[in-house]
Image: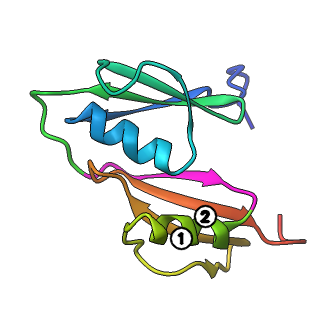
Amino acid sequence: MNSGTGIESIDAVTLATHDMARAVAFYESLGFERRYGGPASEFTSFRVGSGFLNLILERDRELSWWGRLVFHVSDVDAMYRRVVALGLHPEAPPRDAEWGERFFHVSDPDGHELSFARPLPGRR
């Protein structure tokens, strides 16, 4: 419910990074489609469905855990295999959650927690 505010959806999320080249390589290795910027840019944008995941270079600011970003994917187990094949270390293997999603978590090189999920059939 938008409580009369007119807020309809999230268009973009922006994450800070200390190393743009490393962050771009990480997200592209996971299959994210770059729309703007790149390894030498101060700002990079990836298309995610109808929205965007943005990266901004922050050289002087300390980064710390802030929460979790959830991406729906067509096949959670295939994404998990891709992540492991890249030499990354997910928190745990995919599992079916009581709230009706199959999911797993992995952190990006700057410590941002990403969750790859898919609603379970008949649960959402």
Rendered location of residue 19, percent (x, y): 22, 35
* Residue 105 or residue 78, whichever sits in front: 78
Please state, as top left, top right, bottom left or bottom right, where the N terminus lies in the image.
top right
- Disc marking residue 79: 2
Q: Residues within 10 Å of mark 1 (few under 14, many from 20)?
A: many
Q: How far apart in space, not on screen, are marks 2 and 1 (Cα)? A: 9 Å
- Disc marking residue 104: 1
Rendered location of residue 118, percent (x, y): 72, 63
CB contact under 8 Å: marks 2 and 1: yes
In primary-sequence order, the first of circles 2 and 1 is 2
The residue located at (68%, 24%) in the rendering is 7
* Residue 38 or residue 17, whichever sits in front: 38
* Residue 8 or residue 55, whichever sits in front: 55
The part of the chain drawn in magenta is 65-74
Render colour scheme: rainbow
Relative vertical location of residue 110 with respect to residue 113 in this rendering, above or below: above
Rendered location of residue 64, percent (x, y): 21, 48
Q: Residues within 10 Å of mark 2 (few under 14, many from 20)?
A: some
